[in-house]
Amino acid sequence: MKVLITGANGYIGTRLLPVLLEKDHEIVCLVRDKRRFEERSDFGDPVKIITGDLLKETSIETIPPDIDAAYYLVHSMAYTPEFSRMEALSAHNFVQALNHTHCKQIIFLSGIVNDGKPSAHHTSREHVEDILREANAALTVLRASIIIGPGSPSFEIIHKLTEKLLVMVAPRWVKTRCQPIALYDVLAYLEGVLLNEKAFNQTFDIGGPDILSFKQLMLAYAKVRKPDRKIIVLPFLSPKLSSYWLHFVTSGSYPLARSLVDGMKNETLMHDHRIDGVVPRQCLTYQEALNFCLCDGTTN
């Protein structure tokens, strides 16, 4: 079958592509910068590259009409007043372009949202879901908690904090619970729902078997890499101060740090396990996912 991947230069897209190629799918990758894609991969004839900017409707008219399914893997980690409007515009333009094709299914990877005030990014992703539902194609949404794998922004934060700090004075959000899932399992779910009619017009939570706080995630990482690490939690650090702390310690951008802190304030736990009846699998534990990353040499 012919499958479209948007965000093919991104964290998930670059890792999903070889998984789909192993299943002998014909792949069309929509990217803004063709040179970036060609520098990172050489997949040959089964992969067709088309360039376009989802913010510019006329630039994505080259999407082939004979695609069978499409992955929408476009997320902004910016923290500006404009990011939610831009995400909505991208989704709208994508739907308009896809409605001129024979696409049967859109697959969107989003985030779990539990009780509490959702972050601006979670609110924006829910709005994107609503826009994608307006397409002629059926929509499948997979909502994940923190993804454990190289390149995952949340996992890279765990990695950098634990590697750099002997004693970590951390904000209270490190006590927030999540349900981490291995990148390996996320890719398996993304492939498993592809043109699976049981998944049409459905939204599923996906997660691993463990429920852990971010503090427990970091301590488990430290046990393997830096066993002498200690974490002291200070309850009075505001989200803004927490973001600056994260920014300076990890050397990441402040907008990225702010979006991550906002997302870490609320629990992200699976309350819906219906995915087990659609794509049955035994997901890796956090320790197994961690060992896979470290033993594979994917973190330094």
Image (spheres, helix red, strand yellow):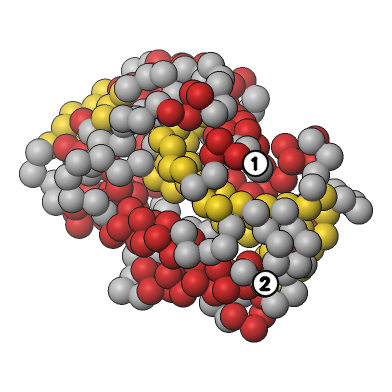
Other-residue count near label 1 (Cα within 10 Å), few / some / many at <14 / 14–19 / ≥20: many
Which amino acid type is marked by label 2? His
* Residue 34 higher or lower than 231, as above or below: below
Q: CA distance from mark 1 to mark 2?
A: 20 Å
Helix, strand or loop at label 2? It is: loop
Give me the residue at 52% from left, 52% from top: 139
Q: Earlier in the sequence, mark 1 or mark 2?
A: 2
Give me the residue at 30% from left, 44% from top: 113
Q: x%, y% of residue 25?
A: 80, 44
Q: Nearer the viewer, mark 1 or mark 2?
A: 2
* Number of numbered discs visible in the structure rendering: 2
Helix, strand or loop at label 1? It is: loop
Q: x%, y% of residue 182?
A: 52, 28
Q: As drawn, is 257 to the left or to the right of 181?
A: left
Task: Indicate the quadrant containing the C terminus: top left, top right, bottom left or bottom right.
Answer: top right
Q: x%, y% of residue 257?
A: 34, 53
Give me the residue at 26% from left, 23% from top: 230
Q: Nearer the viewer, residue 283 or 253?
A: 283
Residue 194 is labelled as 1
Residue 100 is labelled as 2
Which amino acid type is marked by label 1? Leu
Q: Is residue 183 visible?
A: no
Other-residue count near label 2 (Cα within 10 Å), few / some / many at <14 / 14–19 / ≥20: some
Q: x%, y% of residue 206?
A: 45, 32
Give me the residue at 23% from left, 33% from top: 176
